[in-house]
């Protein structure tokens, strides 16, 4: 085991053993933020089938005129439904350990394995959640300090030439509100934006942002806070597999998503949990293992770019 590795002290072959610290030091965990912004599919769980179908009610078209004519029947409109199927799958990882390692080790092997597995599970779920957000049919690419491009076919077609800034906040906010009529997050009036640090830095370095905060919140720059601007509440993440740290020409853009209510759903058959297995291989308790395991899936609720339906704009680049 690593805790008891012997090293040569002199060419004659005398050995020494380095002392171990009483405290363990853990590698830092990346910040995970996506899980708190997904909606759980209610009424679905164990023993309810291998997939769940979300039923979505489409809008009724507004007529040119609703004025009626005497003696003429009231015109009829169509009530339309659509569906979205989510198919959960098994996910999990494990770490084996021997009873000998527990007997020899100064530290609690089992507890430390559990801690690191919980961290890994959190990262995996965050990545799965972010992947669902990034399936958005609407892509936005900053092309300059005051220009950008929208794609509505689910595929980004242009390269970013600028970073996220106040102008781009304005354009994406207006697109969500005016073009898509997307409702604000959690029934409110604001949208949520999750971005890598590079994009947040681009916003904080924007002269328009700095000038605006001179009077509204002078401490924002000092505290490295962005907060809400143009009805978009910005959240920062440094999780590499969730969002790309640098995209576009020269890595100028930090990837992100901006969304309103009912953006991504999570279907759970079994909530991810830790499981312990003793006596692996029936070897009299010498080999044990701990795993995390669950049955789950994530998907965007509205997989369209239609007004009144789409809820997510993916800020990205080729």
Image (spheres, rainbow, N blue to C red):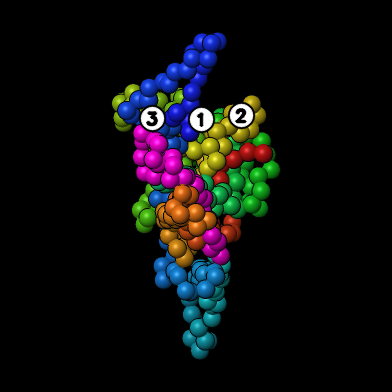
Q: Residue at x 51, y 30 (%)?
A: 198
Residue 96 shown in magenta: yes
Kindly identify which numbered label has been placed on residue 26: none
**Residue closest to the eye, 220 or 288:** 288
Confirm or deny contact between disc 2 and disc 1 (CB under 8 A): yes
Q: Is residue 94 above or below residue 23?
A: below
- Is any part of residue 182 visible from this angle? no
Packing grade of label 1 (10 A; few <14, some 14-19, many >=20) is many
**Residue closest to the eye, 248 or 174:** 248
Q: Position of residue 276 (x, y in %)?
A: 42, 54
- Left or right of residue 307: residue 284: left
Question: What residue would you read off at disc 1?
Answer: 198
| Of the image marks 2 and 1, the number of the one nearer the N terminus | 1
| Residue furthest out toward the top | 11
User: How far apart are labels 2 and 1 at the CA level?
Assistant: 9 Å
Packing grade of label 3 (10 A; few <14, some 14-19, many >=20) is few
Chain part drawn in magenta: 87-113
Q: For residue 115, which quarter of the picture?
A: top left
Q: Residue at x 67, y 39 (%)?
A: 318
Q: Position of residue 238 (x, y in %)?
A: 47, 35
Question: What residue would you read off at disc 2?
Answer: 251
User: How far apart are labels 3 and 2 at the CA level?
Assistant: 33 Å
Q: Position of residue 172 (x, y in %)?
A: 51, 44
Question: What residue would you read off at disc 3?
Answer: 25
- Is any part of residue 8 visible from this angle? yes
Secondary element under disc 3, as helix, strand or loop, is loop
Secondary element under disc 2, as helix, strand or loop, is helix
């Amino acid at each position: 085991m690593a805790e008891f590795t012997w090293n040569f002290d002199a060419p004659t072959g005398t050995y020494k053993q380095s002392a171990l610290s009483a405290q363990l030091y853990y590698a830092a965990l990346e910040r995970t933020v996506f899980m708190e912004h997904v909606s759980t599919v209610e009424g679905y769980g164990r023993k309810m089938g291998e997939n769940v179908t979300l039923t979505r009610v489409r809008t009724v078209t507004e007529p040119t005129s609703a004025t009626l004519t005497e003696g003429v029947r009231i015109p009829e409109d169509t009530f339309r439904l659509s569906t979205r199927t989510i198919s959960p799958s098994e996910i999990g990882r494990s770490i084996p350990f021997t009873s000998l390692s527990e007997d020899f080790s100064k530290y609690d092997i089992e507890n430390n394995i559990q801690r690191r597995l919980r961290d890994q599970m959190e990262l995996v779920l965050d990545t799965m959640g972010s992947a669902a957000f990034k399936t958005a049919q609407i892509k936005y690419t900053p092309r300059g300090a005051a220009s950008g491009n929208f794609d509505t076919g689910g595929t980004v077609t242009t390269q970013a030439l600028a970073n996220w800034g106040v102008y781009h906040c304005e354009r994406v906010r207006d697109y969500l509100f005016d073009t898509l009529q997307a409702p604000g997050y959690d029934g409110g009036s604001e949208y949520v934006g999750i971005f890598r640090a590079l994009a947040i830095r681009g916003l904080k370095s924007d002269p328009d942002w700095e000038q605006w905060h001179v009077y509204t919140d002078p401490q924002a720059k000092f505290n490295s806070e962005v907060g809400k601007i143009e009805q978009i509440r910005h959240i920062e993440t440094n999780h590499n597999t969730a969002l790309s740290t640098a995209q576009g020409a020269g890595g100028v853009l930090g990837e992100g998503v901006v969304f309103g209510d009912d953006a991504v759903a999570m279907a759970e058959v079994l909530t991810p949990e830790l499981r312990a297995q003793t006596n692996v291989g029936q070897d009299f308790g010498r080999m044990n293992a701990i795993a995390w395991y669950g049955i789950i899936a994530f998907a965007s609720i509205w997989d369209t770019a239609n007004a009144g339906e789409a809820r997510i704009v993916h800020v990205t680049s080729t």
